[in-house]
């Protein structure tokens, strides 16, 4: 341990990075979290109940109702225009003995809550800098930092997104498939509330999904 700066280093400032840093620190490891400042995350996350149950069990959130909106129904609409289309289908959580299929959270509120938990952990140090390089050794690795410094640890966790520096530098292979689509995420003010129903319109070139966000608001996920 004496040759290292910490027992674990977590790279990545997003929800996964913060959650990983908290989990590792709670496991009793001296942890450094590299979390450079960035623009606010204005997206939302619709999480199914196994994920929500984990957030509660890990102490990352208390009552999901404090920061999210329940998804009690899922309506599937075939909007393809085919001659023979699938019938409209409504799935209700109560029919499966559930109070909700999941919860819709604003990422910014989740992140605020996670940061509040992280601030209570004595074994977790957060640094406002990122990693620019990674070199592995037999039992760990060394990170080159954006501020010019270096850090080493026997455990390095790369939670730094799609184009992960850590994954690439460590030699983990990936397979990518490029879809001819673009995604749009925005918030809607509706003429009437949609309750707890997530409405999925399935078009030939992608879904159009208003996800309930409380009152007359919905979060839109659109792939085209």
Image (spheres, grey):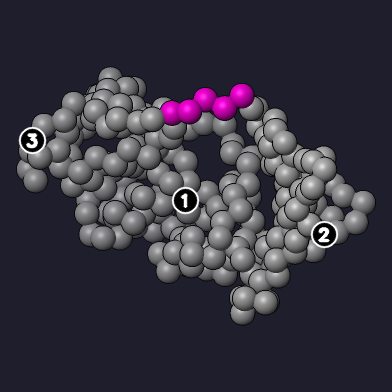
Give the structural element (helix, strand or loop) at label 2: loop
Locate residue 120, reporting x and y percent: 39, 58
Horizontal side of 93 relative to 34 (left or right) equals right
Horizontal side of 65 relative to 4 (left or right) equals right
Residue visible at 60% across and 63% down in the picture:
102
Residue visible at 24% across and 28% down in the picture:
171
Q: Nearer the viewer, residue 118 or 65?
A: 65
CA neighbours of label 1 inside 10 A, class few (<14), some (14 to 19), many (20+): some
Q: Nearer the viewer, residue 4 or 205?
A: 205
**Residue topped by disc 2:** 194
Give the structural element (helix, strand or loop) at label 1: helix
Q: Nearer the viewer, residue 17 or 49?
A: 49
- Highlighted magenta segment, given as a residue range: 176-180
Label 1 and label 3: CA atoms lie apart by: 33 Å
Q: Are marks 1 and 2 in contact (CB under 8 Å)?
A: no
**Residue topped by disc 3:** 138
Residue visible at 7% across and 43% down in the picture:
2
Locate residue 58, reporting x and y percent: 40, 64
Quarter of the image with the C terminus in it: top right
Number of the front mark, 1 or 3: 3
Residue visible at 49% across and 64% down in the picture:
50
- Counting every numbered tag in the picture gives 3
Residue 177 is covered by the magenta coloring: yes
């Amino acid at each position: 341990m004496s040759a290292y700066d910490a027992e674990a280093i977590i790279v990545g400032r997003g929800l996964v990075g913060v959650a990983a840093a908290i989990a590792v620190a709670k496991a009793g490891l001296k942890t450094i979290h590299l979390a450079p400042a960035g623009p606010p995350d204005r997206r939302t996350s619709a999480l199914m109940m196994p994920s929500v149950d984990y957030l509660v069990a890990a102490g990352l959130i208390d009552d999901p109702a404090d920061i999210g909106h329940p998804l009690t129904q899922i309506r599937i609409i075939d909007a393809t225009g085919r001659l023979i289309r699938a019938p409209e289908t409504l799935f209700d959580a109560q029919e499966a003995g559930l109070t909700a299929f999941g919860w819709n959270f604003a990422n910014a509120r989740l992140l605020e809550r996670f940061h509040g938990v992280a601030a209570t952990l004595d074994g977790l140090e957060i640094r406002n800098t990122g990693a620019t390089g990674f070199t592995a050794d037999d039992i760990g690795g060394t990170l080159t930092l954006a501020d010019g410094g270096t850090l080493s640890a026997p455990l390095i966790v790369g939670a730094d997104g799609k184009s992960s520096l850590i994954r690439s530098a460590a030699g983990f292979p990936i397979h990518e498939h490029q879809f001819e689509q673009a995604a749009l995420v925005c918030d809607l003010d509706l003429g009437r509330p949609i309750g707890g129903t997530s409405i999925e319109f399935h078009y030939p070139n992608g879904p159009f999904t208003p996800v309930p966000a409380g009152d007359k608001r919905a979060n839109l996920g659109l792939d085209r």
